[in-house]
Image (spheres, grey):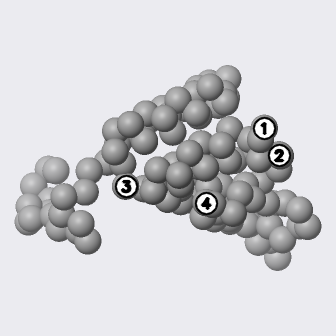
Amino acid sequence: MLGLATGTARGGVPSAQIAVYKICWAYGCTDADILAAFDDAIADGVDIISHSVGGWPQDYFEDAIAIGAFHSMKNGILTSNNSAGNDGSEPKSISNVSPWSLSVAAMQYHR
């Protein structure tokens, strides 16, 4: 771009491709859109699903992210980067706890 970095781009997997699915809108992220994106990604044959969407802890049978991640896992696809929440080290602050997906958290530290 603009004459910068004119060399050849290489990565860990030269054949890797990126698929993007929109699930959130100005009014939020609906369960139907979340599940449709998981279904589309599975049907498209992705190797890994990485997203940063969270909410609040829910029962696995009511949590669209946990359900979508379970279907992905059943199809051999790891769901990575489930948003664990940004409330720091408060007890029970993680929002995605399904054991079949990888959750990542962040916190803000104030002095």
State which tag comes first along the sequence, 4 or 2.
Answer: 2
State which tag comes first along the sequence, 2 or 3.
Answer: 3
Q: Are circles 4 and 2 on residues that touch, CB within 8 Å?
A: no
Relative to residue 17, is residue 14 drawn left or right? Answer: left
State which tag comes first along the sequence, 4 or 1.
Answer: 1
Q: Quadrant of residue 3?
A: bottom left
> Mark 2: which secondary structure?
loop
> Mark 1: which secondary structure?
loop
Sort mark 4 into few (<14), some (14-19) or many (20+) by Cα contacts within 10 Å.
Answer: many
Q: Which mark is residue 58?
A: 2
Residue 93 to residue 66: above or below? below
Q: Residue at x 18, y 63 (%)?
A: 14
State which tag comes first along the sequence, 3 or 4.
Answer: 3
Q: Position of residue 40 (x, y in %)?
A: 43, 33
Q: Amino acid at mark 2?
A: Gln
Is residue 110 in sight in this rendering? yes
Q: Which mark is residue 47?
A: 3
Q: Amino acid at mark 1?
A: Glu
Q: What's the distance in space between the residues labelled 4 and 1, CA to CA?
A: 16 Å
Is residue 51 in sight in this rendering? no
Residue 102 to residue 73: above or below? below
Q: Which mark is residue 101?
A: 4
Q: Are circles 4 and 1 on residues that touch, CB within 8 Å?
A: no
57 vs 100, nearest the viewer = 100
Q: Position of residue 102 (x, y in %)?
A: 60, 64
> Mark 4: which secondary structure?
loop
Q: What's the distance in space between the residues labelled 4 and 2, CA to CA?
A: 15 Å
